[in-house]
Image: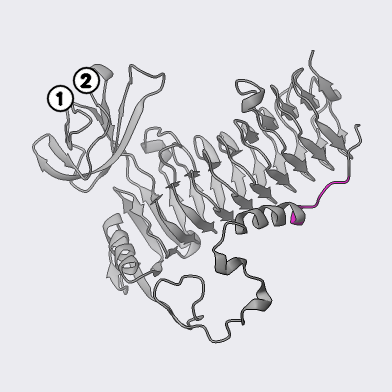
Amino acid sequence: MNTIEPIANRRRFLTTTAAAFAAVGSFAARLRAEERPAVTRPRATSGDAAVEPNWASRLTITVGPRDADLVGTDDKALQAAVAYVARLGGGTVRVLPGTYRLRNAVHLASRVRLLGAGQDTILIKEPSVTTKLAADSDWYDQEITLTDASGFRIGDGVCLKTKNAHKTGPDYCKRTLVARDGNRFKLDRPLRENFWQLGEANVSTLFPLINCEEISDAVVENITLDGNKAKNTLLDGNYAGCIFAQDCSRLAFRGVTARHYNGDGISWQICHDVVVENCHSTGNANLGLHPGSGSQRPVMRNNRLEGNDIGIFFCWGVKFGLAEGNKIEGNRLGVSIGHRDTDNLIVANDIRRSGQAGVLFRKERGKEFAAHRNRVERNSIVDSGGDTGVGVDIEGGTEQVTLVRNEIRETRGPAGRIGIRLSAETNAIKMEDNRISGVARDVVTLK
């Protein structure tokens, strides 16, 4: 094995990141501590979110089938509770035991905590229906006409999809149906994309179960989310999941079960300082956890990620993230990392029975796009892939990756299996104290 310089520990890694983030604070925050007195008797002051008393009780609204502030078992009751708490500056929506059937997403708000009763509080997505558009809608329109409207209702969350002649992938648009005249429906917002019959435009009752957009300081805890995969069509994780977040900061998901979504379990795009702890993402068609494009400093700790296509998928430009102590089992790929995902730490995870590889560094489209300066440390990677499976597969022009003190083990016999595989284009891959056993070849560098 190659030798490397002394390795910084995880605490130093995170401390350095935190220091860089704190450096952008206000002038007052940069003053030396001795230049200002400590706050010993905090008061609530208008506009000051940094210092506030530790109130003994805070606003809580209950939702449930009975004996609740708001009685109901659908998305409307849950959304009403969120709106009430958000209007008063934040608090907790406590979702009592029961099964809640959703025809639209629950849209979370800033400073709102959604708290369930674990496995006894189940939010399940109703079966989806799909139909083609019967008339063109332009980007400035705020209505659509359906070929068959029999499965659609006012209040439904929907997703439109169309082919785009100017790019390889389709266009999507998520909206809510707010008014109706026969097969014509008004949308809550304009389309902002063209949905034409020549593009085979269609609409489906698809949506995330919990949706977060342009909010901050929100929490989801101890709740079970069921995507009802067998009765719903597939929706890309860039748009939905059991939980989906876009353009948010400081979200926390704890003790959440995200299961059976025909797409992702938990997905967040351009969201910073997201914490996912002690969650169970299982049986989802695509990704268990999806720290999405541009997301900075995600923390994914002590989760169970089982039976998804990929356990953890670092998307594009995910930086300074931490994946620690997760049990990642029975996914096609345990961890996948690639396009400009740099300076992340993957440490002390238990990655087992991956269908293809335990950890994959994706090839991408050239060295400039690869996942550089990442550390893979103290992971247990067991029984990866079929007869030609790989424990850690580093493709393309990936550089400055550190692999240290990992256990890569095969219990089914060596066959053609490989512990660590490096492409011919990789550079500065540092390996130290990795224990590799049971494979045909420990380390292979392709020519």
Q: Is residue 25 above or below residue 62?
A: above
What residue appears at the point 37 percent right and 37 percent down from the top-left corner? 231
Farthest-out residue, top: 447
State which quadrant residue 263 falls in: top left
**Pointer 2 local density, CA inside 10 Å: few below 14, some 14–19, many at least 20:** some
In space, the residues marked 1 and 2 are separated at their CA atoms by 7 Å
Residue identified by numbered label 1: 135
Where's the N terminus, which quadrant?
A: top right
| Image spot of residue 313 (x, y percent) | 58, 37
| Image spot of residue 46 (x, y percent) | 39, 75
Mark 1 and mark 2 lie on one chain; the one further toward the N terminus is 1
Q: Indicate the secondary structure of the residue bearing disc 1.
A: loop
Front-most of residues 350 and 251: 251
What secondary structure do most residues of the magenta stretch adopt? Answer: loop
Front-most of residues 403 and 158: 403
Where's the C terminus, which quadrant?
A: top right
Horizontally, residue 165 falls left or right of residue 119, namely: left
Horizontally, residue 368 falls left or right of residue 180, namely: right
Horizontally, residue 178 falls left or right of residue 108, namely: left
| Image spot of residue 296 (x, y percent) | 57, 46
State which quadrant residue 41 falls in: bottom right
- In magenta segment, residue 4: no
Horizontally, residue 395 falls left or right of residue 136, namely: right
Provide the residue span drawn in magenta: 6-11
Whether the residues at callouts 1 and 2 have beta carbons within 8 Å, the answer is yes
Q: Indicate the secondary structure of the residue bearing disc 2.
A: helix
Q: Is residue 209 above or below residue 115?
A: above
Any mark on residue 197, and which? 2
What residue appears at the point 29 percent right and 48 percent down from the top-left corner? 103
Residue type, label 2: Gln
